[in-house]
Image (tube, helix red, strand yellow):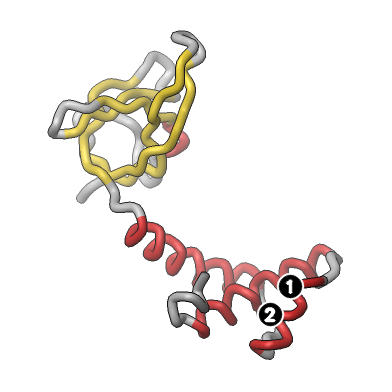
Amino acid sequence: WYEEEGEAERARQTLALVLALRQEEGWPVKGTLRERVQALQVQPAASVREAERSLRRQWQEHLDRLEPRQEGEIASVLPGGKAGFVRTAEGQSFFFRASELKGARPEPGLRVSFRTAPGYDRKKQKATIDAIDLRPQR
């Protein structure tokens, strides 16, 4: 999709990472992937770790443009501290898992930004919308 957006250099960087990973794992390069690699004249990245670190930041920026983040604050943390609820200024409440909170411990009152994703409440046996990718607000 980078090529479709006129970002051929990012497409090459992503393919270089894919090639390096496949090489590291001993996986073959076939079909459409092989065609794209040849068309863009891509060589494997020298370091999987460095290529991934660089691209991860770009992927996050792209995702933020596609799906804007919501803001709210942690309203409550369940006993054991492994999950809780985030409430937006509009009063919407979303369940979250503590593992989705990066860079802080979940505490009531902590301001966060987050995305949402489909979830499932096993206790109530129904589909839900959960908060994911929580980041503390500074």
Kindly identify the residue that appears in the image at 14 percent across and 32 percent down. Answer: 90
Which residue is more in the foreground, 126 or 137? Answer: 126
Snapshot quadrant of residue 83: top left
From the top left corner, tell me how far across and down residue 91 is, in percent. Answer: 16, 26
For badge 1, the amino acid type reads Thr
Snapshot quadrant of residue 98: top left
Which residue is more in the foreground, 20 or 6? Answer: 6
For badge 2, the amino acid type reads Arg
Question: Would you place residue 113 above or below residue 49 in this image?
Answer: above
How many neighbours does mark 1 have within 10 angstroms: few (below 14), some (14-19), or many (20 or more)? few
The answer to whether residue 94 is left or right of residue 133 is left
From the top left corner, tell me how far across and down residue 81 is, in percent. Answer: 40, 22
The answer to whether residue 28 is left or right of residue 87 is right
Where disc 2 sits, the SS reads helix
Question: Would you place residue 99 above or below residue 15 in this image?
Answer: above
How many neighbours does mark 2 have within 10 angstroms: few (below 14), some (14-19), or many (20 or more)? some
Kindly identify the residue that appears in the image at 85 percent across and 69 percent down. Answer: 28
Looking at the image, do the residues carrying marks 2 and 1 touch, with CB atoms under 8 Å apart?
A: yes
Q: Which mark is residue 65?
A: none
Kindly identify the residue that appears in the image at 50 percent across and 74 percent down. Answer: 2
Q: Which residue has dot 1 on it?
A: 32
Q: Which mark is residue 36?
A: 2
